[in-house]
Amino acid sequence: MTERMREATSVRFDVEFKSEGRRSWWWTRKGEMSPLSKGRHTQGTPEPTQRMIERVKSFYSDAVLESVAIERFSREIYLQDTRLTLPQGKRWVKLDLNTFPNVERDVVMTLNDLHPGSVFTDLDPRTLVISQGTDDQGVWRYELTAAANVESNPNTARKKPVEATVWVNHDGLPVKVEQRSTGDDGNRNTKVTKYSDWDATPPVELPPAAEIADAKTATWTDRY
């Protein structure tokens, strides 16, 4: 499966995360990666580009935050967000480390997490057990359980088991991944990732230059 994923040229993703318990929280992310980054870019070929539409419940209120991010392989990041105020006539801001370092870092980390190669990062491979796959409505289904999570994952309590169910098509590509875990706060976390249009996703287009604002002309509201 991982070898076939490395050969893929593009993919569409749709992710839903729910944390249910004393303080419930949720977010959704969907978009495209086309061309799909294979971890290294070859000069003279189209630069891997990805677009993400995110909706997330605010930590501080019932408000829903919305954003659209486009990233090119060179760490060229364009953003629309309900917390951004832009000059008249501008719809996007081009981020830079000097002006919005925390925002740019968060966008990069989020997009890296959405990459198909990262779907198993919540599982500690040293403690991983994989049950026998069965043919389920045209796709292969695998049950994975890890006795420990990867400690860098902020949504999972340390020393707690992490479970995942993976549906793989007959080309060896994942079409759905459901991950289940428990957070340090006791919340039950579920993340469902769906992949589609493998090798058939249209290229991601960059925003028109006339609609892009310089980061120094934009203002950001941290709390919402």
Image: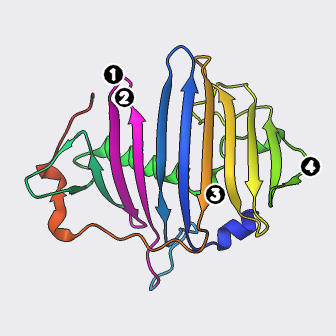
Q: Which residue is mark 4?
A: 132
Which badge, 2 or 4, is on the more N-terminal residue?
A: 2
Secondary structure of the residue carrying numbered label 3: helix
- Could you tell whether 198 is left or right of 96 in the image? right
Distance in Å between CA atoms under marks 3 and 1: 34 Å
Going by the numbered disc 1, the residue's amino acid type is Ser
Q: Which mark is residue 117?
A: 3
Distance in Å between CA atoms under marks 2 and 3: 28 Å
Q: Are marks 1 and 2 in contact (CB under 8 Å)?
A: yes
Q: Are marks 3 and 1 in contact (CB under 8 Å)?
A: no
User: Is 172 included in the stretch rendered in magenta?
Assistant: no
Q: Are marks 2 and 4 in contact (CB under 8 Å)?
A: no
Location of residue 45 in the rendering, given as x and y in whole percent from the top left corner: 47, 83
Secondary structure of the residue carrying numbered label 2: loop
Distance in Å between CA atoms under marks 4 and 3: 22 Å
Work out whether residue 76 or residue 145 is closer to the camera in this orientation and state it: 145
Which badge, 2 or 3, is on the more N-terminal residue?
A: 2
Which badge, 3 or 1, is on the more N-terminal residue?
A: 1
- Which of labels 4 and 3 is toward the front? 4
- Could you tell whether 86 is left or right of 25 in the image? left
Q: Which mark is residue 61?
A: 1
Going by the numbered disc 4, the residue's amino acid type is Gln
Around disc 2, counting alpha carbons within 10 Å, would you say few (fewer than 14), some (14 to 19), or many (20 or more)?
some
Q: Main secondary structure of the magenta part?
A: strand
Instruction: State which region is magenta.
Output: 45-74
Residue at the far right: name it.
132
Q: Residue at x 68, y 57 (%)?
A: 175
Q: From where the camera sits, is residue 154 visible? A: no
Distance in Å between CA atoms under marks 1 and 2: 6 Å
